[in-house]
């Protein structure tokens, strides 16, 4: 199997991606909230430029044209860190801008380092994704642990973006979050409380929840009053 068989090209030009992501940047820059925003505050977000090609062309499955190894919801993706591409696992996907992955040999890992500059890696790497839809909402855990090149709301072209598909119908009125759990955390964490660029948005056309990620660990979709410290529903 060649490297070309392990990923999907994003056929839309990268400049279109930048323009669409600027919608998120403008909304984030205008927000001074110190806690996670409610669903009503989320702007419309056109994700079409980042969609896997099979989805944009009306294919029956996100992965029908994607060449990846999958076994019992364990997917291994070969990532080319030098090219901007979207990779799929089931009906979920992850988008990497070119040169957005920190070299794990030198970058370090942990919450105190998420916004620390790093040297990027250039060689292809294999990422393993364990994923499920327990409870109707999606969950994914990525290995190895990686962090991504820091970028603020003015540099959205550098954002790594994760989309998790729900088997249960998403409701626009619910306050959905994509929570994080990983090394050094006591439980599931809503990172958007301290960083508005990590807010989640709903993609209603594909019944998915989408947000920027700064690192690879475990992520899950949760619905309900997470901003008040409780989870009315979750996938894990």
Image: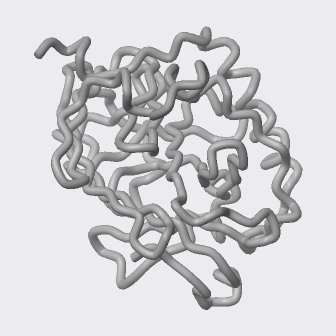
- Please provide percent x and percent y for residue 152: 64, 41
Q: Is 27 left, or right, of 215 in this rendering?
A: right
Q: Is 43 left, or right, of 184 in this rendering?
A: right
Of residues 53 and 96, the one drawn nearer to the viewer in this rendering: 53
In the depicted structure, whether residue 234 falls above or below residue 136: below
Please identify the quarter of the rendering in which residue 67 is found.
top left
Please identify the quarter of the rendering in which residue 14 is found.
top right
In the depicted structure, whether residue 127 falls above or below residue 63: below
- Please provide percent x and percent y for residue 114: 44, 53
Of residues 29 and 172, the one drawn nearer to the viewer in this rendering: 172
Q: Is 206 left, or right, of 2 in this rendering?
A: right
In the depicted structure, whether residue 111 falls above or below residue 174: above
Q: Which residue is drawn at 87% across and 61% down?
A: 41
Residue lying at the far front of the rendered structure: 60
Numbered-mark total: 0
Position of the N terminus, as image quadrant, is: top left
Q: Which residue is drawn at 28% across and 27% down?
A: 79
* Image color mode: one colour
In the depicted structure, whether residue 132 falls above or below residue 84: below
- Please provide percent x and percent y for residue 85: 44, 22
Of residues 29 and 24, the one drawn nearer to the viewer in this rendering: 24
Position of the C terminus, as image quadrant, is: bottom left
Q: Which residue is drawn at 62% across and 89% down?
A: 229
């Amino acid at each position: 199997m060649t490297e070309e068989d392990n990923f999907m090209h994003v056929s839309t030009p990268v400049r279109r991606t930048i323009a669409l992501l600027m919608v998120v940047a403008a909304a984030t820059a205008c927000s001074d909230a110190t806690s996670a925003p409610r669903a009503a505050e989320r702007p419309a977000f056109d994700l079409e430029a980042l969609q896997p090609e099979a989805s944009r062309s009306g294919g029956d499955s996100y992965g029908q044209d994607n060449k990846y190894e999958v076994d019992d919801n364990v997917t291994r993706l070969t990532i080319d860190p030098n090219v901007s591409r979207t990779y799929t696992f089931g009906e979920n996907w992850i988008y990497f801008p070119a040169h957005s992955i920190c070299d794990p040999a030198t970058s370090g890992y942990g919450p105190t380092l998420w916004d620390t500059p790093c040297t990027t890696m250039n060689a292809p790497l294999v990422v393993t994704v364990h994923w499920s839809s327990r409870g109707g909402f999606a969950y994914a855990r990525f290995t190895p642990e990686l962090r991504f090149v820091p970028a603020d709301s003015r540099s959205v072209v550098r954002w790594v973006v994760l989309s998790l598909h729900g088997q249960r119908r998403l409701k626009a009125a619910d306050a959905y979050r994509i929570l994080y759990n990983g090394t050094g955390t006591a439980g599931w964490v809503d990172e958007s409380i301290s960083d508005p660029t990590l807010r989640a948005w709903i993609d209603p056309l594909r019944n998915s929840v989408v947000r920027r990620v700064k690192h690879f660990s475990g992520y899950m979709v949760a619905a309900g009053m997470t901003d008040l410290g409780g989870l009315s529903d979750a996938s894990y």
